[in-house]
Structures are given as C-alpha cells and as structure tokens.
C-alpha cells in the first residue's frame, strides 16, 4: 500500500497547495466544541445569527484542529461522524483545505491513512453513485478497504436535494448505484463505509438535516477577534498600512458593521468598498462624501468598483466607464435574475445549463468583473458557478427586483410568471415585504434590506445613471416606510422579522423611531413609551446601540406584557437590569423559562 499512499499524498498536495495565506489561518486551527444547534441557528439567516451574537467571543470550549478526530478522553472512542458548522463566508472550505494540506505534509492526524475530500458542488453533478465509485471518483489511489480513511463532505448547504433520513432506503452494498442523496444518508447512518470517519461541513440551518443523534462531535468556526481582523486588513493592503488602519477605524466606528466584519467574507467586501471610497473621496465633488455605512451603500460601491474594473490601482477612463454601465445593465438583467430565482429556490450553486437557461453570456462573465461577483470552479464533469458571498447574491437579486418592479405587470415571486396583475413599483415593494415576513427561515431578510436601501438618497446618488434614475426614489420612499412600519406593531411578541424591518428602515435612512427610543433610554424616560412599534425599535437597539453595550437598563419601564413581547430578544443581553418594574409573580416564571433555554446568553441579571 505504500506507493499508493505516496501517490495519494502527491495528488492531494498538488490540488491544495495554492491560495492559503498563512497569517489569517491561525483562527481556524482552534474550533469551538458545541452541543448542538441553537434555535436561531436552525431558523434564522446567517447574518442575523452573527448580529444576535454581537460578535462577542463564545463561552464554548475549544478543540485544536489536530485533535478533531481523536477521542476526547482515554476511555472514549474516536468520533465517526464530525459536523462543523459556520455561517456563509466564515471559512469552512478554507478550513478543509488547511486540514488537507497539513495532513498531506504529515503535520496532523498521522493515524489517518487516506483523506478523501469531496464537495457537495461535485456531488450535485451525479444522479446515481455507488460508495465505491464515490471514493474512486475523488481519489483513484484509495483502496476499497476504508479503515483509517477520512471522507470529507464540504458544503451540505450547497447540495441540490435535502437529506431525508426518515424515508431513506437502506443500502449496504458498496457496489450498488443509488441516488446520491440516498448514498450520503446511508454513509452517515453507517450502512456504507462504516469503517471510515466522515467530516461534514455546512452552514448552520442546513446542518439541521442530520439528526443530532447521528453526530458524534459538533464544532463551530469562530469569527475574527480584534487582532485577527487587523492582520486580515494588513494582508489585504500590504503596501499601504495607512489605508489599512483608516479602513479599520471606520469599521470599528460603526458597531453594526464591526460585528459583521468578524466574518472574513463580509470583511473583505466591506474593506474593499471603504478603501475604494477613501481613495476616491477627493474627486467626489458630485457624490456623497460620507463614508459608506449601511449595507446598501457598501455593496453599491463594491458593485461599481467591480464593474468599472476600477480596482484600486487602475486609472479611470470615460469610455471604460460607459462600457461598464452598459455591461451592468445587461448583467443585472441576467445575472440578477439568476440570483433572485436562486434565492427563492434556496439555490446558491449554478451549472452551465442554469447559465444558459438564464441567458447569461459567459464571455461577459470572464471579464474583470466576474471574480468580484461570481466565482467558478471547474470539475471533471462540468463547471460550477457561485456568488463570491451569499450577500452578493442577495444584493444582485435586490437590484434585479428593483429594476424589474418598475415595469413588471405580474407578481415577480411567482415563477411561472402567471398571477393576478400587479402594477407599479410600490405594489411590488409591498409584495416583497409580505413574502419576507412569511419566509419561515428569514431567507429574504437581507434581500429586503438591500431592496429598502436602494430607496435611500445616498444609494440613489451612487447608482443613478448606472441602474437607477436620479431621484426616482423620492416618490416611493414614504410609502415604502409605511409598508415596513406595518410589520412592526401587529404581533404580540417582537419577532426577528420585526427586528429586520427596523434594519430595513435603517437602510432606507428612516431613523426617527430608533433615535427617539435611544434618546429615551439615555435619559431614562422609556416608561409609557413602549408601544408595539417602539418595542421593535428597542429590540433592534439591543443589538446595535452603544447605550446597551455594557448593560441593558430597563428599570422602571416594563409592564408584564411588554416584558413578554421582548423575551426572545432579551435572551441575548449579557447584562440586564429589570429592577423597580411593577411585575407580577408570573414574570418570574417567564424569566425562569428563559434563563434555562439553550439560546440564553444572560450572564448578569438585576
């Protein structure tokens, strides 16, 4: 077996040797050991999960990467099924690459003889496979015996079929060709390749498809700490330390952004946009001169930068800009439509036939712009395309919806295109608000923030002449605000959808409600102000306001009903003051149930 092992190592080293910057990877060498998925991880959008955790360090124990597949104590057995979760852009595929490289160089997990790395992107290209052909397709040098073999399955959230463990047909024959989703469930259950260890990576919500009883060890990838964020930015701008520290200053000054920038994928987009803005802020007489701070502003800059090929070093030419504007219109029509329909179907990876079906001109994509917005991965059987971050797909989807809504006569959410007539931008905007409210898993939340942000004056100035008409948002803005505020007072409990509606108002730059509640918190005059709408504003402020950073002081202002409506949000305050409220005994029961919950992060309570 020795020469086979040698061949296997060589082929792995050649496939993963490039593109790993060492400095930023220290974070990945320690994973968090977690007990299971929290409610929020199962039900909410990745971005919301990060905002709720406020970028604070986790209290979970950590486990070094080199011990990931070892028993935790002398008396336990090594885990067969390991599951690692992390939000979009946190570095799951990078972690796998890092592990495979380190293993191939003999640095870690030497007790494993063969490592077989597969991605769900590749598995999507097969209809049927047998266990033997699965191993062989990935690593021709691996023998059929699977003792001391690690099978890596990266990116469960990108798999085209949901895994159904309750109805999967049992198969124990490694030579039998079966549906790929069925093959995966049988491998995880231990009916096939039972001697092999299996490592699955996934975004949190999709990880819930695997019954927790089948998972022997679950870990989570943590985001950047302060020093790591600084290193990451220094690596992004290696020859310009000044720029790097200016960018960091701007990120730190904005708490909402700072929290999201703990995700490397998001940090890269934000830092590129702010750097682009700073470099061009001198020649922006006609444009806003305020540093981009909302998601929509950051992504509008990023989009312009990607399209004008005006990456930091290239000079600008009028002709190139004009070409870029024309390209942008064509692209939003085709690529934006792909992004939008993908979002509705929870689809984030596309293949050549999808590109053809949406009329996407592949030659356009191979120009400078594509790598900023779309990445491609060549595989033996076909090519996979995917957006460089989930939020890029959501931004392009919102741009498409915005431009299509101006002239569409049917409901854009109905894919057959046949529905009751819907006319006018505002009726399409209201329809999007309703759809986002109804989406159980919050998958339209960030799309909704971008769609709202496209109605804000700074974004209109940024993109007018490109994709928006100058000042066209003026006539729609106040009614869009009404539609969003309609989500705030209707329910008994403040939901995550309501908090998201507050964030949409923030993107739209309608900040009156939040400002009034924040002022009242500062001056201790919240009592009597907590209407349902203001409760939603308060829930939003718990996440973003500096007033709530050290301690959330809600003394003297809560009634039983208000406390009940805010419960799901109060869970995430580390330090909470509720003294001098006229509570009945049943509030104690309420709080008791909260404090014992899995999601509860309260550490001090008065």
Image (spheres, rainbow, N blue to C red):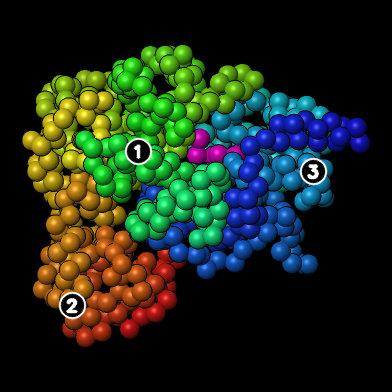
Seen in the picture, residue 105 relative to 76 is either above or below; the reply is: above
- Does residue 492 appear left or right of residue 308 in this picture? left
N-term mark: 3 or 1: 3
Tell me the tag on residue 157: none
**Residue 555 appears anywhere in the view:** yes
Q: Main secondary structure of the magenta part?
A: helix
In the figure, is residue 474 to the left or right of 185? Answer: left
Residue drawn where x is 78% and y is 67% of the image: 74
* Foreground of the two, 592 or 361: 361
Can you identify the residue that label 3 sits on? 105
The stretch in magenta equals 154-158
Q: CA distance from mark 3 to mark 2?
A: 60 Å
Q: Is residue 529 above or below residue 63?
A: below
Disc 2: which residue? 524
- Horizontal arrangement in the rendering, residue 28 relative to residue 140 (left or right): left
Residue at 17% across / 47% down in the picture? Answer: 484
In this rendering, which labeled residue sits more in front, label 1 or label 2?
A: 1
Crowding at mark 1 (Cα within 10 Å: few <14, some 14-19, many 20+): few
């Amino acid at each position: 077996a020795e020469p086979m092992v040698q061949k296997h190592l060589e082929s792995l080293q050649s496939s993963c040797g490039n593109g790993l910057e060492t400095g930023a990877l220290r974070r990945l060498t320690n994973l968090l050991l977690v007990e299971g998925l929290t409610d929020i991880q199962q039900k909410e959008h990745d971005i919301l999960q990060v905002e709720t955790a406020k970028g604070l360090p986790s209290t979970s124990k950590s486990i070094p990467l080199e011990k990931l597949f070892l028993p935790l104590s002398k008396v336990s057995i090594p885990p067969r099924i390991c599951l690692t979760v992390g939000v979009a852009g946190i570095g799951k595929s990078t972690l796998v690459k890092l592990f495979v490289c380190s293993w191939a160089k003999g640095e870690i997990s030497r007790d494993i003889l063969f490592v077989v790395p597969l991605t769900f992107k590749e598995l999507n290209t097969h209809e049927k496979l047998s266990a033997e052909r699965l191993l062989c397709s990935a690593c021709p040098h691996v023998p059929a015996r699977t003792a001391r073999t690690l099978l890596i399955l990266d990116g469960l959230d990108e798999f085209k079929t949901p895994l159904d463990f309750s109805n999967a047909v049992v198969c124990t024959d490694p030579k039998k060709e079966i549906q790929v989703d069925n093959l995966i469930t049988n491998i995880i259950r231990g009916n096939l390749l039972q001697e092999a260890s299996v490592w699955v990576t996934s975004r949190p919500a999709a990880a819930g498809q695997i019954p927790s009883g089948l998972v022997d060890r679950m870990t989570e990838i943590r985001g950047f700490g302060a020093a790591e964020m600084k290193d990451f930015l220094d690596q992004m701008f290696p020859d310009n330390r000044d720029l790097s520290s200016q960018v960091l200053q701007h990120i730190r000054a904005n708490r909402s952004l700072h929290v999201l920038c703990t995700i490397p994928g998001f940090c890269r987009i934000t830092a590129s946009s702010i750097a682009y803005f700073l470099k061009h802020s001198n020649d922006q007489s006609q444009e806003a001169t305020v540093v981009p701070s909302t998601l929509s502003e950051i992504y509008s800059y990023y989009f312009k930068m990607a399209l004008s090929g005006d990456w930091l070093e290239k000079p600008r030419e009028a002709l190139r800009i004009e070409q870029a504007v024309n390209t942008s219109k064509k692209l939003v029509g085709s690529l934006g439509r792909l992004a939008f329909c993908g979002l509705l179907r929870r689809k984030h990876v596309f293949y050549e036939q999808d590109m053809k079906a949406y009329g996407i001109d592949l030659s356009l994509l191979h120009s400078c712009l594509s790598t900023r917005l779309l990445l491609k991965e060549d595989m033996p059987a076909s090519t996979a395309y995917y957006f460089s971050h989930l939020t890029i797909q959501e931004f392009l989807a919102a741009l498409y919806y915005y431009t299509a809504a101006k002239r569409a006569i049917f409901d854009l959410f109905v894919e057959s295109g046949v529905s009751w007539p819907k006319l006018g931008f505002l009726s399409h905007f209201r329809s999007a608000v309703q759809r986002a409210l109804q989406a159980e898993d919050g998958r339209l939340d960030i799309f909704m923030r971008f769609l709202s942000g496209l109605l804000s004056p700074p974004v209109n100035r940024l993109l007018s002449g490109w994709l928006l008409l100058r000042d066209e948002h003026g006539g729609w803005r106040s009614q869009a605000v009404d539609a969003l505020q309609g989500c705030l007072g209707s329910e008994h409990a403040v939901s995550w959808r309501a908090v998201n509606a507050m964030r949409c108002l923030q993107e739209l730059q309608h900040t009156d409600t939040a400002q009034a509640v924040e002022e009242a918190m500062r001056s201790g005059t919240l009592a009597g102000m907590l209407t349902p709408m203001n409760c939603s504003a308060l829930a939003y402020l718990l996440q973003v306001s500096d007033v709530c950073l050290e301690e959330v002081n809600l003394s003297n202002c809560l009634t039983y009903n208000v406390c009940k409506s805010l419960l799901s949000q109060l869970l995430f305050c580390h330090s909470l003051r509720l003294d001098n409220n006229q509570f009945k005994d049943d509030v104690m029961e309420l709080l008791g149930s909260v404090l014992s919950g899995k999601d509860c992060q309260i550490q001090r309570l008065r």
